[in-house]
Image (cartoon, grey):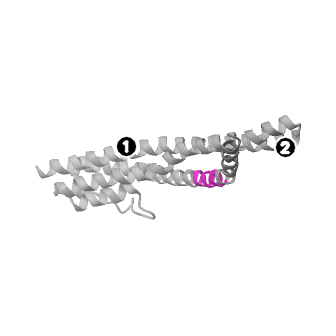
Amino acid sequence: MNLLTSVLYWLSTGMMIPVVVLLLIAFGWSLMLLGDLYGQYGWRLRHRSTIQQMLTKAERDGIGGLALKSLSKGKKSRFVCSLQTLMQQSGRHCQEEKALTDFELACRCDLDASLTLMRVGPMLGLMGTLIPMGPALAGLASGDIASMASNMQVAFSTTVVGIFVGAMGFIVQLIKKRWHQSDHALLVYLLELSQEEKE
């Protein structure tokens, strides 16, 4: 029994460094996602009026007369790429449906990163909290207060970082999901306008 508990102890303490490394990677990843979110927000803010004008023009003149040059400057958004594909495939039902499906899949892939952080971050934080607790309790029992304090500091630090990573993943997931739903609804609406033109 002592051998089994010793093996478990070695395994758990041996996981501490990988957990900390993964937490640091997840923290950097969450900052990158926040930067990407800010970039997308800036694009939407700059082109909000242009998209509204485009929608008004499509309702009045049809989707065929849309000009996407103003939206295509710089890095194209996923919405613009999908809209261009829909316009190129206008009238071909299967290709139009595939363009919408591809957009949905791309949006899901975009959300996977934030979803992963939202779930994995707190898990890593919890592991980083529990692993040092064993040595901390052992230090307390032996009267080594300095060792206990050091281990508790690591435990609380990993908890904070794990919660931060999970929170950032949740925020990015929530905002991007709403954006993707809005873009998808707009693409479907424009596709229906295009189909009405053909009838």
161 in the magenta segment: no
Q: Up-down: is 57 above or below 2?
A: below
Residue situated furthest bottom in the rendering: 74
Q: Main secondary structure of the magenta part?
A: helix
Q: Nearer the viewer, residue 182 or 113?
A: 113
Give the percent coordinates (x, y) of residue 61: 22, 51
- Please state, as top left, top right, bottom left or bottom right, where the N terminus lies in the image: top right
* Amino acid type, residue under disc 2 in the picture: Ser
Q: Which residue is mark 1?
A: 181
Whether residue 181 is visible: yes
Q: Which residue is mark 2?
A: 147
Q: Secondary structure at mark 2?
A: helix
Give the percent coordinates (x, y) of residue 168: 57, 44
Q: Nearer the viewer, residue 115 or 54?
A: 115
The tag earlier along the polypeptide, 2 or 1, is 2
Q: Residue at position x 69%, y 53% from top?
A: 17
Residue situated furthest top in the rendering: 141
Tell me which corner region of the image, top left, top right, bottom left or bottom right, holds residue 124: top right
Residue range (magenta): 21-31
Q: Residue at position x 27%, y 46% from top?
A: 188
Nearer to us of marks 2 and 1 is 2
Q: Residue at position x 20%, y 51% from top?
A: 194
Label total for image: 2
Give the percent coordinates (x, y) of residue 28: 62, 55
Give the percent coordinates (x, y) of residue 89: 21, 60
Whether residue 160 is visible: no
Dot 1, how many residues are within 10 Å of its Cα: few (below 14), some (14-19), or many (20+)?
few
Q: CA distance from mark 2 to mark 1?
A: 51 Å
